[in-house]
Image (cartoon, rainbow, N blue to C red):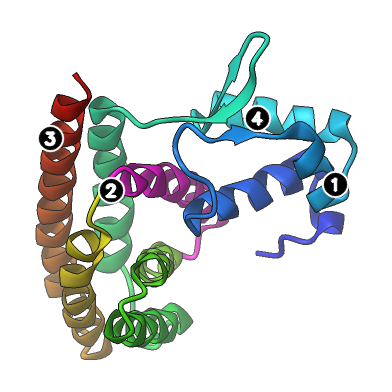
Amino acid sequence: MTDTRESMPLSDWIAKRIRLMLISGELRPGQRISEAAFSEHLEVSRNSLREAFRIMTKEGLLRHETNRGVFVQTPTMASIMDIYRVRRMLECGALRKAWRLHESVKTMRQAVEEAKQKREQELWVDVGSANMAFHSAVVALADSERLSELYERVSAELRLGFALIEDPRLLHSPFVDMNDEIVSLCEEDRFAEASEKMEDYLLISENGLLKAFGKLSGKAR
């Protein structure tokens, strides 16, 4: 799916660019978004930027505060649980119906190798980005632009949850090897097993994130 400015309404293109900034970790929960700075950075009018803000506010990724401006949304425990419900449907379902020669299997392998390299360098934000790329490739196995677009929004919200955790090493490092196991099963055409492994992965990931989120919430009180 192309994402050039010519291929979609400008406000949608702006929203997509900001989502990608969320997914990459460039924007953090609670961060104020400067209308002037973003308008200049993206080379778009403020009216188009405001329309993109409205789109992303409906998606739950941004929030508008009267007389204060636009801020990156901070996830809640309920939203994290809902994200993982969606992930199970998308990722496990895509794996169950996939086939070994799908181009996305190669993309999954590339993302795993990238994550391994960044892990050795202890570049944890980059490890997280590589892991996100892996899971996007999993959803792409379904050959559905609509599902991939949905997962892009889910990924942006998920990354905001990750950004709240104090130790990104514990958050990302263990899952590199699990991703490796999953793609290896795909390369061997064992997609039913890969789907079961993903179920285990998502349960461990969700429990770990909720536990860390709960501790963080406790400190805030």
Tell me, for residue 40, which label it has, or none. Answer: 1
Residues marked 3 and 2 touching at CB (< 8 Å): no
Position of the N terminus, as image quadrant, is: bottom right
Question: Between tags 4 and 2, which lies in front?
Answer: 4
Q: Dot 3: what SS? A: helix
Residue annotated with mark 3: 215
* Mark 2 Cα-neighbour bin, 10 Å: few <14, some 14–19, many ≥20: few
Q: Marks 4 and 3, Cα distance to the nearest angstrom? A: 32 Å
Disc number lying in front (1 or 4): 1
Lower position in the chain sequence, tag 2 or tag 1:
1
**What secondary structure is marked by label 2?**
helix
**What is the distance, in whole Å, between disc 1 and disc 4 at their CAs?**
19 Å
Give the residues in magenta. 143-165
Q: Quadrant of residue 134?
A: bottom left
Between the residue at mark 4 and the residue at mark 2, the CA separation in whole angstroms equals: 24 Å
Number of other residues with Cα within 10 Å of mark 4, as a class: few under 14, some 14 to 19, many 20 or more:
some
Tell which tag, 3 or 2, sits nearer the viewer.
3
Amino acid on which disc 2 is placed: Met
Residue 125 drawn at (x, y percent)? 39, 65
Q: Which mark is residue 89?
A: 2
Q: Residue at x 21, y 90 (%)?
A: 188
Q: Disc 3 and disc 2: Cα gap in Å? A: 28 Å
Residue located 18% across and 66% down the image: 195
Q: Amino acid at mark 3?
A: Lys
Picture layout, residue 118 above or below residue 11: below
Give percent across and percent down for residue 211: 10, 40
Rendered image: mark on residue 55: 4
